[in-house]
């Protein structure tokens, strides 16, 4: 019983048993949820069937009333004077074409015009001159900075090449 093969076989069998139990639990849960959905669908279907039957009965009563007022005629050409049903009103509000066009074209058109105005202003003579002036000033500043750094570098190089002076310095 202490051999590695027996131990491995026992572990594999235990893992398989756990997997089967987990799978069975999942299948049972799925089946319960499917049954619950089926019951809900059946109840909804029954409610719809009752509603359709009620509407059909109302329609039959209305047809009987129309025939009785027409003196038993099988075919009624006109229903003048009969009770007219209320006109069906669409639940969605009507939106005017002008509003739709304004929303579809207005905002993008305003953005395009604003962009055009900005580009035209940026490329104007005044802006170009201001940009040119700023660029020249920046170039001048950078040139002066480079010259200052070069002078400092030359000064440090001269100091480094000079022989040491002072009381501890040797004479050549």
Image (cartoon, rainbow, N blue to C red):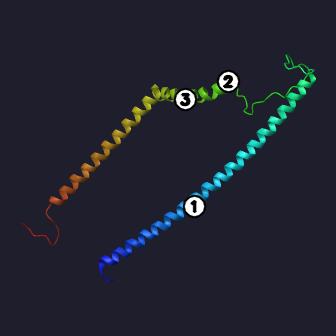
Which marked residue is nearer to the observer: mark 2 or mark 3?
A: 2
- Are dots 2 and 3 in contact, CB under 8 Å? no
Residue 64, above or below 10 = above
Which marked residue is nearer to the observer: mark 1 or mark 2?
A: 1
Q: Which residue lies furthest to the left in this view?
A: 172
Nearer-the-camera pick, 99 or 71: 71
Residue 6, above or below 125 = below
Q: Which image quarter is the C terminus in?
A: bottom left
Task: Give the CA distance from mark 1 to mark 2.
Answer: 56 Å
Crowding near the residue tagged with mark 2, few <14, some 14–19, many ≥20 C-alpha atoms within 10 Å: few
Q: Seen in the image, is 17 located left or right of residue 65?
A: left
**Residue 98: numbered disc:** 2
**How far across and how far down the image is residue 28, in percent?**
56, 62
Residue that label 1 marks: 29
The residue at 21%/52% (across/down) is 154
**How far across and how far down the image is residue 82, in percent?**
90, 23
Task: Give the CA distance from mark 2 to mark 3.
Answer: 22 Å
Q: Earlier in the sequence, mark 3 or mark 1?
A: 1
Q: Seen in the image, is 96 located left or right of residue 54?
A: left
Q: Seen in the image, is 119 located left or right of residue 91?
A: left
Q: Which of marks 1 and 2 is nearer the N terminus?
A: 1
**How far across and how far down the image is residue 130, in percent?**
44, 32
Label 3 residue SS: helix
The residue at 10%/70% (across/down) is 170
Label 1 residue SS: helix
Nearer-the-camera pick, 145 or 20: 20
Q: Seen in the image, is 50 located left or right of residue 142?
A: right
Residue that label 3 marks: 114
On the image, which quarter does residue 69 sit in? top right
């Amino acid at each position: 019983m202490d051999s590695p093969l027996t131990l491995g076989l026992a572990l594999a069998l235990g893992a398989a048993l756990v997997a089967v139990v987990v799978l069975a639990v999942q299948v049972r849960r799925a089946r319960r949820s499917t049954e619950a959905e089926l019951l809900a669908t059946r109840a909804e279907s029954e409610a719809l069937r009752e509603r359709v039957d009620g509407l059909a009965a109302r329609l039959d009563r209305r047809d009987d009333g129309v025939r009785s007022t027409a003196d038993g005629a099988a075919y009624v050409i006109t229903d003048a004077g009969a009770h007219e049903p209320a006109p069906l009103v669409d639940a969605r509000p009507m939106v005017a074409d002008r509003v739709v066009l304004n929303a579809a074209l207005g905002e993008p058109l305003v953005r395009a015009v604003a962009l055009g105005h900005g580009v035209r202003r940026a490329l104007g003579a005044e802006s170009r001159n201001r940009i040119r002036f700023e660029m020249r000033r920046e170039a001048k500043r950078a040139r002066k900075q480079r010259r200052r750094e070069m002078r400092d570098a030359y000064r440090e190089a001269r100091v480094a090449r000079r022989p040491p002076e002072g009381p501890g310095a040797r004479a050549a």
